[in-house]
Image (tube, helix red, strand yellow):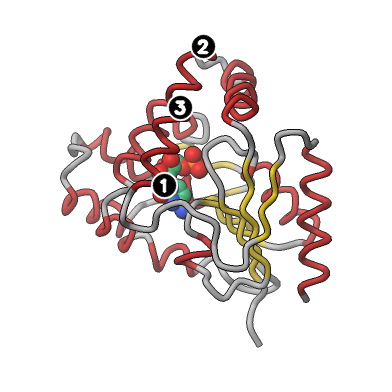
Amino acid sequence: LTVPVITIDGPTASGKGTVAHRVAKHLGFHYLDSGALYRLTALSASRHGVALDDEEALANLARVLPCQFVKGHVLLDGEDVTDAVRAEAIGVAASKIAVLPKVRQALFDLQVAFRYAPGLVADGRDMGTVIFPDATQKVYLTASVDARASRRYKQLKEKGFPATMEDLVKDLAERDARDTARSAAPLKPAPGAYILDTSEMTVDQAVQTVLDLYVNAV
Ligand code: C5P
């Protein structure tokens, strides 16, 4: 019996984290925020003074990442880094190390291990293409750069991080380019993925759409 998986891939700040989390909660499934693993590796690198282009050393950090996910909190080496990993600079660093094949390989087993009963909702860039190619339902969640920048702006301000719309649009465009242009697991809709553009949608509508897709898939 295979454990059901819903994959939600898409660009930065498309809202996939919020939607994936809500869908998981509704179904009583586990939730994998795969971006957090790249962010944790980037944070760990910055704390250990490892350069963002030292593929071997980064892969070694990623392979034994001392992280825990407890009730919506992310711990690194036992320290609560939930807010620290969300910082924009860490997101940018994460997208730089995510181009390195050895880092991606080092995080593979950890991601696959999140799939256990009763089911999993996994969000990221390559959940449907690389990590869970046999997913029950694949979704590619996207939104316009402007919609994504203003959502990210609100999020950062709420958390007390400095941000300007101008910088965010530039950052998003750069990260989109890096995520889609890289040769290792580039961001693209998985074969068979449902393309969900949420530019004009509320979170509730997006969540309901994914739930309906899943119900029809099983
Ligand atoms: O989704 P999030 O913004 O937290 O991801 C941070 C970075 O990690 C992304 O910009 C992307 O480059 C990388 N990432 C990835 N593959 C994933 C998840 C995230 O390459 N499955």
- Secondary element under disc 2, as helix, strand or loop, is loop
Q: Is residue 50 above or below residue 196?
A: above
Q: Position of residue 142 (x, y in %)?
A: 62, 43
Q: Is residue 129 visible?
A: yes
Ligand 1 found in image quarter: top left
Instruction: Check if mark 1's residue and mark 2's residue have beta carbons within 8 Å.
Output: no
Depth-wise, is mark 2 or mark 3 nearer the camera?
A: 2
Amino acid found under the numbered disc labelled 2: Thr
Q: Position of residue 169 (x, y in %)?
A: 50, 22
Q: Residues within 10 Å of mark 1 (few under 14, many from 20)?
A: some
Residue 1 as seen in the image, left or right of residue 129: right
Amino acid found under the numbered disc labelled 3: Ala
Q: Give the distance between the C-alpha atoms of the residues marked 2 and 3, in whole angstroms.
A: 14 Å
Q: Position of residue 81 (x, y in %)?
A: 46, 35
Q: Nearer the viewer, residue 133 or 183?
A: 183
- Provide the residue designation for mark 1: 180
Q: Residue at x 35, y 53 (%)?
A: 65
Q: Residue at x 29, y 44 (%)?
A: 97
- Provide the residue designation for mark 3: 87
Residue 87 as seen in the image, left or right of residue 18: left
Quadrant in which residue 135 is drawn: bottom right
Q: Earlier in the sequence, mark 1 or mark 3?
A: 3
Amino acid found under the numbered disc labelled 1: Thr
Depth-wise, is mark 1 or mark 3 nearer the camera?
A: 1
